[in-house]
Amino acid sequence: STHMSSDRLDWSQPPPKEDGTWTRRGGRRPFHEDVREIFDESHAMTTGINFNEYDKIPVEVSGRGAAEIGHIDCFVEAGLDAAIVRNIERCGYTKPTPVQKHAIPVIMAKRDLMACAQTGSGKTGAFLLPTIHRMTEEGPPPSSVETVQNGGRWKAYPVALVLAPTRELASQIFAEARKFCFGTGIRAVVVYGGAEIRLQLRELERGCDLLVGTPGRLTDLIERYRVSLSQVNCLIFDEADRMLDMGFEPQIRRIVEQEDMPTSRQGRQSTMFSATFPREIQQLARDFLNDYVFLTVGRVGSTHSSIRQVLRYVEDTDKYKDLRRLLEDQSEEGLTLVFVETKRRADELEHILCRDRYPATSIHGDRTQAEREEALRDFKMGARPILVATDVAARGLDISHVNHVINYDLPHNIDDYVHRIGRTGRVGNLGTATSFVNESGRPILRDLWALLEENEQEVPSWFMSLMRDVTSSKGSRYGPGKGRGKGGPRSASFGSRDFRQHSSSSDFRRFEEVDNGRTRGLSSPRKGGGGITRRSTASSPFVRGDGGFRVLYGGMTVLSVQQLIREAKARKKRDVAE
């Protein structure tokens, strides 16, 4: 969204009147927050907005009644609550982004939504604004139950739940939620691992209407009987593909299917945002969303023209020398994000840069939450304008004025490449992404070439020569490969379109299974992808299905062997490869 100058904001005006029904929900005391602290101007956009190009991004909407829902061209057209409109003004947002133009009316119409939008497209506002509006419109649940004392402990009953893959993304969503909730009486709380749980419990006890959290920490709090999901009527998944990449599918399915959360039939509205739409996400959408609207902003899993992509052939031994040359040649002041593959490389590169008097910091999975927050704060404020990061920082980080992303080490797959370079060129800003390429990057060269061609980026002749030596990799998303159709940068099987319009695809074989007396439709995303946590009538602890064995526990299908292997690999990727 466009950001106005702080000179245009009248901070002397009082906040909107609080809604008393939310303010005193469950008998809690009213809470007061400082307007300047919430609407912190340090996160303002500082680079020029290129909305002329941004508005040209193609948008596709499908689903029952999608055409009748329409879109908005300004926030006023959405009919949002007056307090929310005032908060939008305080943030300085004047024009909705493409995803906001189409997603807000869909969510306001109380329809489920599956949205595929590029990184930095304004997704957070797209789901928070209509969700908070619904809460102000409907008020607290009729029971007015927010916390219940149980053995001296208090349990929180959120009405809206946002799940995010990382603590950084959860914290950023929470920061935006506080802004949009200001003056409404609605209280947002964030929970995530890697931080002191006692402080988070204290925040929950003060009241929780909108809960933002990571799946692992939320599961922990549910097990401690400190959070109930029985009042949740708005469920939101942000960066759903990243959550699956990190092995969170069992926790997600437990949260949605095995706890006390209302089902879609009981009125729960579900919204899923994902930058890519692989088969696993299609499966998740099919299981959790009901009669949903499918929204694509830009090309799914692609990048946009506001990012200039540059390739440099650099041997491993010459990478640091070329990095220094890039840093010295930068003409614009701004932030530079350098991606590496391992935690050790991140530490080493930060140390060498600081030794050579380059103001650098680093972030990776072994850092404590306090260290990560300090590094991000120094980076955002420009105290250390060079951030060395592993892929833990590749998704969801809302750092608005990154001018340059450098892939010091190429990632192993094209999705990670897309999310890495998406840290620049955000919300219409112009940016540059430079990648160091050599023979070690072979796994993604073909996909990278197709992506560059699709976005009309310059492809060096040496890159073509290097790529000719690379055979088509199995599972290549962009290039020709097994099961990917005949040529073209992307086939429908990847999911660039609403797969429901192509229901004949063999990727989804629909079958019926009895679940506690109810018949529910399930789907098999691929060979060996047996269902998770599905009721089975078989007596054997192992059941053959879809090319793999599913493990049963007490009659409950828990995990397929293939899924156990995939999740072990995901954990290894998260905990070791960094």
Image: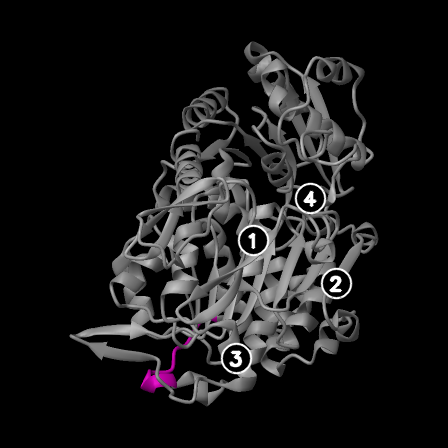
Of pointers 1 and 4, the one earlier in the residue sequence: 1
Q: What element carries label 2?
A: strand
Of pointers 3 and 2, the one earlier in the residue sequence: 2
Direction front: furthest residue: 539
Q: Distance between the residues labelled 2 and 4?
A: 17 Å
| Residue lying at 63% horizontally and 60% vertically, measured from the top left | 114
Q: Quadrant of the N terminus?
A: bottom right
Pinpoint residue 476: horizontal percent, then vertical percent. Answer: 66, 31
Pinpoint residue 490: horizontal percent, then vertical percent. Answer: 74, 39
Amino acid identity at mark 1? Gln
The residue under label 2 is 62
Amino acid identity at mark 4? Ser
Tag on residue 283? Answer: 1
The residue under label 3 is 135
Amino acid identity at mark 2? Ser
Label 2: few (<14), some (14–19) or many (≥20) C-alpha neighbours in 10 Å: some
Left or right: where does residue 181 sit relative to residue 556? right
Q: What stretch is highlighted in magenta?
A: 25-34
Whether residue 317 is situated above or below residue 483 in the rendered picture: above
